[in-house]
Amino acid sequence: MAAMRCTVALPDRALFQGEIAYASIPGTDGYFGVLPGHELTVSLNREGGLVTLTVGENEQEKKQFLVSAPSVLDDTGPVLARFGTGVADIDAAAVKAEADECRQIIADVQQKNDPQDRATLVTNQKRLEWCEAQLKHISGAAA
């Protein structure tokens, strides 16, 4: 089995590190595949989506990660994302609670209308988008 080293990482931790046989990455024109030994590629990535890795002795096991703002670097397959989680690890109740918290912070900051709070506003808008992407994914998976 041909393999390449891959890391799916967030700014603060790795979601996955290991050998893979194939990666499916969300691009602006659909998903693109990455195989061991691939040529260096430049691609515009979607704001987010599902990264699927094929791993295991017989290339039978799949690991899936929902990510926001992914980028792929060099020929070793690192996938870097602002937000991400293993699909199996999404906790709907916790995500809903985080989304509600973000909505409250956004409302408070918008009400104050203080330019000093711009970073807080943008950060929580992005966190809310991430929560909504997770909820959309799990509601689509349940359908």
Image (spheres, rainbow, N blue to C red):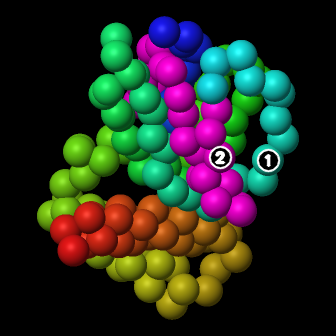
* Residue 38 rendering spot, x and y as whole percentages: 74, 24
- Is residue 27 on the magenta stretch? yes
Most extreme residue toward the left is 93
Q: Amino acid at mark 2?
A: Phe
Q: Which is the main secondary structure of the residues drawn in magenta?
A: strand
* Residue 126 rendering spot, x and y as whole percentages: 54, 65
Which quadrant: the C terminus? bottom left
Residue at image position (73%, 29%) is 73
Residue at image position (51%, 21%) is 21
Q: Which residues are magenta?
A: 12-34
Q: Which mark is residue 32?
A: 2
Residue at image position (34%, 33%) is 62
Query: Residue 95 occupies which quadrant of the picture?
Result: bottom left
Query: Which SS class for mark 1?
Result: loop
| Mark 1 in CB contact with mark 2 (< 8 angstroms) | yes
Residue at image position (71%, 62%) is 29
Instruction: State how far apart marks 1 and 2 are (Cα).
Output: 9 Å
Whether residue 107 is situated above or below residue 60 in the rendered picture: below
